[in-house]
Amino acid sequence: MDDKVSDLSAFRIIAENRKGVLRDISTVVAGHNANILMVHQEIFDSGPFDGMAELYMEYDHCSDSSAMFAKLNEIESVREVTAVEPFSHIFGTRVIIIGGGAQVAQVALGAVNEADRHNIRGERISVDTIPLVGEKTVAQAVDAVARLPRAAILVLAGSLMGGEISRAADRVREAGIPVIALKMAGSIPQHVDMVVTDPIQAGVFAVMHVSGQAVFDINRVRGKEF
C-alpha cells in the first residue's frame, strides 16, 4: 500500500445537529497538528440517533490521536467518537461508470471481474455505476465525478452522447480524471481519452489503468480507438 495512503487515519463522530459543531471539532483537530484531508457530514433521519449529525473525517500527521479523541469527547455537543478505517483502506480507488442500463451493466461486468483479480492480491479497487437517461441528467452526473472522493477514472457507456455531456467530460479531464467512452453516436468520442467498442473490455481497461500492478497506461494510447 502507498505510504501516503497508509498514513491516513479517520474517525466518526455523533454530535448534536446545531451551529458551530463543525467549528468546534475542527478546532480540536487542528490543535493536535492533524491535517484534515476529507470531511463528510450528514443528518440521521431514523434510528437511535434520529435528528443528530454524523461527521466522518480523514486526517494525517496527528501528534497524539488518543489525546485528540479525549479532547473531542469533551465537546458539549459530541455524543460519541470512534476511530475507524479510512475509506481509502476499505474501498480504495474508484472506477465510475455512467450511462445506459444495458451498457453500464456490461462495462461493470468487465470492471468487476478485472478488479477481483487485483483485489485478491491486496489492491483496493471499487466499481460504482449509475444508469441514467437524458442529456442534462447524464451531464450533471459526469460533472459530479470530479467532486467524488477517490474517483480515478470515468467510463461513459451508452449509444448516443454529446452536447452538454461532452462539455462535462472535458471538465472532468481537466480535473485530472481520464475518461473512456464506448464507441457510440454523438460527439462524446471526440472528447474522451480512449474509445472502446466492447463494453466488457472498456471496464477491463479502466481497472487496469487505475491498478498499481497492471502495465496498461491510458496516457500511452490517448486518442486511440479499440
Image (cartoon, rainbow, N blue to C red):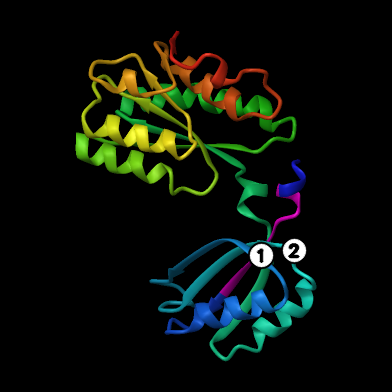
**27 relative to 186 in the view: left or right:** right
Query: Which range is magenta?
Result: 5-13
Q: Position of residue 24 (x, y in %)?
A: 56, 83
**210 relative to 127 in the view: left or right:** right
**81 relative to 188 in the view: left or right:** right
Query: What residue sits 29% from the left and 29% below the top?
Result: 166
Q: Is residue 165 visible?
A: yes
Residue 61 is labelled as 2
- Quarter of the image with the C terminus is top left
Q: Is residue 181 part of the magenta span, yes or no?
A: no
Residue type, numbered disc 2:
His
Viewer-closest of 35 and 87 = 35
Using the image, determine if residue 169 lies above or below residue 181.
Answer: below
> Mark 2 touching mark 1, by CB under 8 A?
yes
How many badges with numbers are in the image?
2
Residue type, numbered disc 1:
Asn
Q: Is residue 11 part of the magenta span, yes or no?
A: yes
Q: Position of residue 150 (x, y in %)?
A: 55, 45
Q: Is residue 134 visible?
A: no
For label 1, the residue is 35
- Label 2 secondary element: loop
Q: Position of residue 4 (x, y in %)?
A: 73, 48
**153 relative to 159 in the view: left or right:** right
C-alpha gap between disc 2 and disc 1: 6 Å
Query: What residue sits 32% from the left and 18% below the top?
Result: 190
- Quarter of the image with the N terminus is top right
Residue at the far top: name it.
226
Residue 69 is labelled as none
Alpha-carbon neighbours of circle 2 within 10 Å: few (<14), some, or many (≥20)?
some
Alpha-carbon neighbours of circle 1 within 10 Å: few (<14), some, or many (≥20)?
some
Query: What residue sits 33% from the left and 18% below the top?
Result: 189
